[in-house]
Amino acid sequence: MNTNPNCDNDKCASPHGEVRVLPTGGDGNAILCRACFEHELRFRRARNPELGPDCRFALPSWDSLAVYAPARLGASNAPATSADDR
């Protein structure tokens, strides 16, 4: 199984690798690996001719997208505890 656990789609070519943030409109985003990004862009290119000018999907480049860096769980994110809290 090649699904990248950090990717929102299921067309991943590898279970590892960089993922980037693709804006989907409004406040939404999709977190996609490169293979899933390419799959999404193929869909958008195919669909755009059927849509009106105000409804067409943006076609950003991979390099223009922000790299997704999920918050890491660990000591820096753990709630502070003290002897008084026990």
Image: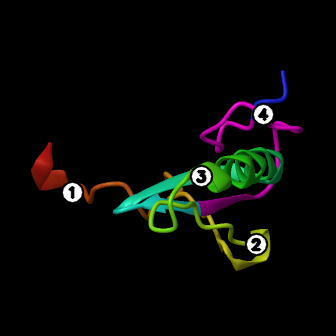
Q: Quadrant of residue 69?
A: bottom right
Q: Nearer the viewer, mark 2 or mark 3?
A: 2
Local packing at callout 4 (Cα closer than 10 Å; few below 14, some 14-19, many 20+) is: some
* Position of the C terminus by quadrant: top left
Local packing at callout 2 (Cα closer than 10 Å; few below 14, some 14-19, many 20+) is: few
> What residue type is disc 2 on?
Ser
Local packing at callout 1 (Cα closer than 10 Å; few below 14, some 14-19, many 20+) is: few
Marks 3 and 4: in contact by CB < 8 Å?
no
| Residue marked by disc 1 | 82
Give the Cα separation between the discs numbered 3 and 1: 37 Å
Magenta stretch containing residue 9, yes or no?
Answer: yes
**Closer to the N terminus: mark 4 or mark 3?**
4
| Residue marked by disc 3 | 31
Q: Nearer the viewer, residue 32 or 46?
A: 46
User: Which residue is outermost to the top?
Assistant: 1
| Residue marked by disc 4 | 11
> What residue type is disc 4 on?
Lys
| Residue marked by disc 2 | 61
Magenta range is 4-21
Q: Position of residue 15 (x, y in %)?
A: 82, 36
Task: Name above or below for residue 43 compared with residue 59.
Answer: above
**Closer to the N terminus: mark 1 or mark 2?**
2
User: What element does badge 1 sit on?
Assistant: loop
User: What element does badge 4 sit on?
Assistant: loop
Q: Position of residue 41 (x, y in %)?
A: 73, 54
**Closer to the N terminus: mark 2 or mark 3?**
3
Marks 1 and 3: in contact by CB < 8 Å?
no
